[in-house]
Image (cartoon, rainbow, N blue to C red):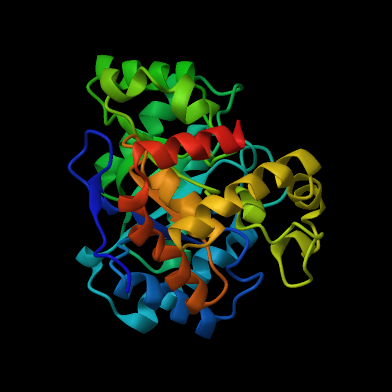
Amino acid sequence: MTSKMPYRRLGRSGLQVSVLSFGSWVTFDTQLGDQMAIECMSAAYDAGCNFFDNAEVYAGGKSESQMGRVFKELGWARHSYVVSSKFFWGINGRMPNMQNTLNRKYLMQAIDGSLERMQLDFLDLIYCHRPDPKTPIEETVWAMSDIVSSGKALYWGTSEWSADEIRAAWLIADQHHLHKPIVEQPQYNLLTREKVEWEYARLYDDIGLGTTIWSPLASGLLTGKYRDGVPQDSRGALPGYEWLTERVTDAASVAKVEQLRPIADELGCTLAQLSIAWCAANPHVSTVITGASRASQVLENFAALDVLPLLTPEVMARIEKAVS
């Protein structure tokens, strides 16, 4: 039985998100048909998840379309869930102003495309999916703030930006009385920690930054399933994900994961549950975005909530020693 889902405020904003959330990267439209997506999202929602993460670029817009169909099919009250998308790479081919940019023209059109695909009147949260060194940060901040003012989105943030870029954006917004970025979406897991634990350390208090972290399982590496190579049914075996195979079969990383196995065994949980709970134990993490390709996997991931109370200082020290 999974523990009751806790909720945390997204940074200093008033928006509350479930500590464990559900994302569509890799799985939607690639591994999942509509019926399986309905089952996965229903399992997450019924377990108390209220945040569903997406991005324009996922499956070239098809991930947003699929999530939109699921929302429509399930008929959930719009106030009962939080949904996000992210903009930068674009999906309209190699055209000027339509790819790898955060200029005003692109952003103003990107939000309309997402709303159309998701069949929604507004998104709760939108992100600048990567920094754009060719567009002045001021132009991006004004555009994102104007989208929020228009009611097409309620909050905005960044993903994989540097601390300096986030602070610059926040200061521009503050100076011009615009809607400020409230959240960053970085990669964070037992093997990738620098941004969340070091680089952003001062931003949590200084500007009230929240985080919605992705890849808590290091693309599956922290599940331990890559110990003997790449299973055929894993995302590491998908066409176009060859870059991932190299990462998840790295011998040094696989060895660290094996050091964690006895700790998980003692706590009576899986390596995945241990790794997700470890991320959620960080008070600067607003929500841990999980992914799944079947409903049983959603429930297995969410059982990490039962592991959270078991992460005593002593256990955390053992985990630290195992991966250091």
The one nearer the camera, 27 or 169, is 27
Point out the image quarter for the C terminus: top right
Q: Is residue 91 visible?
A: no
Residue visible at 24% across and 67% down in the picture = 78
| Furthest-left residue in this view | 14
Please state the horizontal and vertical placement of residue 46, each as a whole percent of the image. Answer: 30, 75
The one nearer the camera, 128 or 136, is 128
Q: In this view, does 180 lie above or below 281?
A: above
Res 115 → quadrant: bottom left
Q: Is residue 236 left or right of residue 209?
A: right
Residue visible at 37% across and 28% down in the picture = 142
Tag count: 0
Please state the horizontal and vertical placement of residue 285, each as a whole percent of the image. Answer: 36, 40
Q: Can residue 299 be seen in this view?
A: yes
Please state the horizontal and vertical placement of residue 182, each as a whole percent of the image. Answer: 31, 34
Q: In this view, does 275 lie above or below 269?
A: above
Res 38 → quadrant: bottom left
Please state the horizontal and vertical placement of residue 155, each as a whole percent of the image. Answer: 30, 42
The one nearer the camera, 5 or 27, is 5
Q: In this view, does 29 lie to the left or right of 286?
A: right
Residue visible at 60% across and 36% down in the picture = 323
Q: In this view, does 103 lie above or below 85?
A: above
Q: In this view, does 175 lie to the left or right of 300?
A: left
Q: Is residue 74 left or right of residue 161?
A: left
Point out the image quarter for the N terminus: bottom left
Residue visible at 32% across and 64% down in the picture = 49
